[in-house]
Image: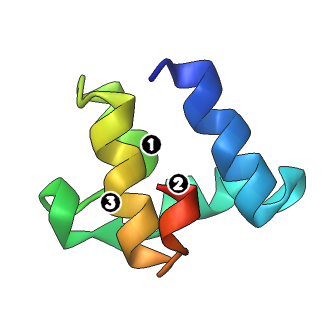
Amino acid sequence: MRHTEFWARMESTLGVAYARSWADQFVMSDLGGRTASEALDAGVPPKQVWAAVWKALNLPPSER
């Protein structure tokens, strides 16, 4: 997964206006106590970050 696909999924799930804000503020233990944005900036693969987001938001299996 590329960064562009990650952000497209985030925007599709949370909306364009809220996706970046959520990614900058919501801390996840699955990402070592980082936000999605911090994890991406630290080099965590977007697929791994998406898996943490998927789990945190309790999204359906079809969104995995």
Residue that numbered label 1 is attached to: 37
Q: Which amino acid type is shown beneath numbered disc 3?
A: Ala
Asked if residue 62 lies left or right of residue 31, the reply is right
Numbered tag placed on residue 52 in the rendering: 3
Residue nearest the viewer, comparing 28 with 49: 49
Q: Around disc 2, counting alpha carbons within 10 Å, would you say few (fewer than 14), some (14 to 19), or many (20 or more)? A: some
Residue that numbered label 2 is attached to: 24
Q: CA distance from mark 3 to mark 1?
A: 12 Å
Residue 54 image point, x, y percent: 44, 64
Q: Which amino acid type is shown beneath numbered disc 2?
A: Asp
Q: Around disc 1, counting alpha carbons within 10 Å, would you say few (fewer than 14), some (14 to 19), or many (20 or more)? A: some
- Closer to the chain start, of discs 2 and 1, is 2
Q: CA distance from mark 2 to mark 1?
A: 5 Å
Residue 48 image point, x, y percent: 27, 42
Q: Which amino acid type is shown beneath numbered disc 1?
A: Ser
Residue 25 image point, x, y percent: 50, 65
Element under label 1? helix
- Of labels 3 and 2, the one closer to you: 3
Element under label 2? helix
As displayed, is residue 40 above or below residue 4? below
As displayed, is residue 34 above or below residue 2? below
Residue sitting at x 18%, y 64%? 30
Snapshot quadrant of residue 21? bottom right
Element under label 3? helix
Q: Are marks 2 and 1 in contact (CB under 8 Å)?
A: yes
